Amino acid sequence: AQPGDAFAIRPNAVTLRAGNDAKHLVPNKMRDFFCTINLDQEEVFRTQVVEKSLSPYFGEEFYFEIPRTFQWLSFYIYDKSVLQKDLRVGKVAIKKEDLCNYTGKENWFMLQPVDSNSEVQGKVHLELKLNELITDNGSVCQQLVVHIKECHGLPLINGQNCDPYATVSLVGPSRNDQKKTKVKKKTSNPQFNETFYFEVTRSSSYTKKSQFQVEEEDIEKLEVRVDLWNNGNLVQDIFLGEIKVPVKVLRNDSFQAWYLLQPRENGNKSSKTDDLGSLRLNICYTEDCVLPSEYYVSLRNLLLKSSDVQPISASAAYILCEVCRDKYDAVLPLVRLLLHHHKLVPFVAAVAELDLKDTQEANTVFRGNSLATRCVDEMMKIVGKHYLKVTLKAVIDEICESPKPCEIDPIKLREGDNAEINMENLRYYVDKVFREIVQSSISCPTLMCDVFYSLRHLAAKRFPSKCSLCSENDIQSNIINFCIYLMGIVKILSFFITDAQTSRTLTLISKAIQTLGSWGSLTKSKLSSFKETFMCEFFKTFQEDKFTESVKKFLDDVSSTESKEPSGLSEPVHLKEGEMYKRAQGRTRIGKKNFKKRWFCLTSREFTYHKQQEPIFTIPIKNILAVEKLDESSFNKKNMFQVLHGEKPLYIQANNCVEASEWIEALCRVTRCNQKRLSFYHPSAFLNGSWLCCKATVENTVGCARCTADVPADTQIEIDGDRETERIYSLFTINMSKLQKLEEACGSIAVYQGPRKEPDDYSNFTIEDSVATFHTLKQIIDIVGKLNESHEKYRKKRSSSAKYGSEIRKQMLTIKNTYM
């Protein structure tokens, strides 16, 4: 294949970071508010409810891959109601094309009114043609042919597939000729395949009067308009979106294209758009165009051998972090790539050794914001997730099932609450969570133990006379961030919790654990500097030697040996859980084929669903043969997937596209090594005696479609090495001018044995060996240049193949599913 033919475009990634809050919301009285995140009209996440506030602070962070095309990323503020439907106060809607303008920055957005005529999503496939017809008397007239083929991705109406139909109109200053398709029942992807004909200009002999008279020059003012509607039967039809195409662009040509549905321009616009309040958001949006793996071989190999380069400051990985303005941008893809190829531990050891050369005091070991500490921070977030889930699940379950009031903020105390009793309850929970963490050293992931061992060994070598002190301090400053990750785990678990009190309790516990993790550096003077004075009073009860000793012992345990087999693997790892809908499998003669809501749980051993506490159906992981998407046409339901095992397929409907994608990904990862995995499957269901996809009448016949491609078989970490390498390439491209300045500086030092340029050109860079650094820089620049050429070939090919109206094709490419 030529370059550009086999590009694998990875899904978009969106991060909504902590710090989102709203202010001056209406109605002007204290209410309970929550915020939802929507892809077009599909809700994918929602925050916890903030009670009795006009300026709620949500402070929640969401990270998710986007598995489908979309037009708008929207945020809706709701006024929570107990007895009635929740009221939408206002929204912030950001176009996909505009997300890059806001990424990485904190912005206040004015809430806009929610107008039903602007709530659209989906696309329509049209073929348009302008014909010239010769009449019986020899005169010429023009005819417009509109073939409406299909629509895709129309919104759900009240949680169900809609009943769509389309109106096709030829509109001008004095005419509105309209025609209508048939109604398609219960589908978000209707197949219309209907053709409509419109007279554009009359022949010169045409004399019959009609509702319009159009001269030939008026064709400049004509346009084709297609409106999509949901058939309301006994209620009013609901507007789903429209598109407009000027007739003049057709001339005598014909073409077909996908068009994104647009909101109605003359919708109900409120004159008061500045009195609904505002919402503060911090959004990070990335979009990756990833080439086939062979394009990245040179760059990947150069990065992976970084730990072997002497000195480490001359390595490609180190240079990457030097030239990036924000080290976090470089550390995230670098750590994931090195982790994926088992090269992280030696690299962390190498950069940590460089840090220690500049460390003069033992009590400041690894306490700076250096490359080594950032790599360890990111490593712990990636590999510590399942470890914490297993360690804390029992106590979190207790908190959720039997919650005790723990609010200690005087401002948030309710009438009748006792602050002292609440403080005792919080202390009880914190003690229990803290005890579970410090007693879990035996199940700490091997990779984390290996890194901690390396850090401890290097610190002891640098300060041999203070080995004992180093064994506490070097690990301690890093384990703080590991404990901070508890906040992320709390949010994962609390997503399924509707009780605001329980969610608040988990937040208070996580704050306490973060502080206890840094107990060695906690002093009375620092306690007094707490932002929240009520937390200061709470921590005064913790100033006991046993907490300090417990932290030190835990840190010492996890760094005492270089490698070990964690006993935690003997217990099943909880990977994912949540509520979805499953179709009855009909295991009995009277079993109904309906859909029921169930609680699903995936561990490293089994996949189960529950009606109450005990599972009512269990599939051992080793018995799963394939996990694939299910065509919407099977049951006229969106976001469905199927789990193939020894019995009949288990059909499941997720609540939204992001959730469906995450479940498929998690199930594929944990079953990837199963020996009996299928190579082919049926993308549709077996109904009424035949497979809907291939029409085969034998239920156990071989599938008609090939199963999706492999994903690395790692139940805890799933990393796309090519995508991370592409991100690193992008960082090198953005910072090419710095690379060139650094190369020039190294050449100057190597030739003249000293700097001959202004020091500002490279004074912030570490140049220990100018020759080795120059050699690496030359390789980086050459490799980036070749990748630039490959990307440019793809861009030119895509640009030359794009037609008017086919913008949707380009958007589909940018978010192509990675399961292919």
Image (spheres, helix red, strand yellow):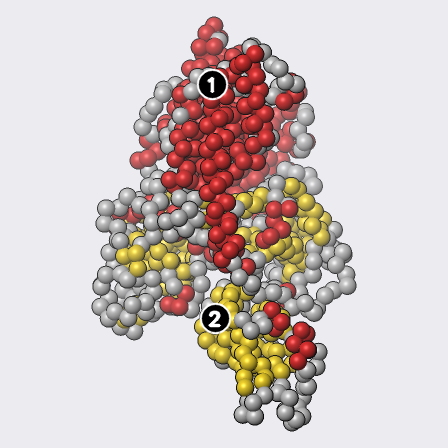
Give the left or right position of residue 694, taking residue 489 as reference. left
> Which one is nearer the viewer's eye here, 561 or 764?
764
Give the spatial CA distance, label 2 vs label 1.
60 Å
Q: Position of residue 612 (x, y in %)?
A: 39, 55
Element under disc 2: strand
In the image, which is nearer the foreground, mark 2 or mark 1?
1
Q: Residues within 10 Å of mark 1 (few under 14, many from 20)?
A: some
**Which three-letter amino acid code belongs to the residue tagged 1?**
Ala
SS type, badge 1:
helix
Q: Which mark is residue 772?
A: 1
- Residue 692 badge: none
Name the residue carrying label 2.
Answer: 150
Furthest toward the top, the residue is: 465
Look at 35% across and 33% down and name the residue there.
Answer: 568
Horizontal side of 220 relative to 125 (left or right) equals: right
Among the 4 quarters of the image, the one containing residue 530:
top right
Q: Amino acid at mark 2?
A: Glu
Residue 586, position as x, y percentages in the image? 29, 66
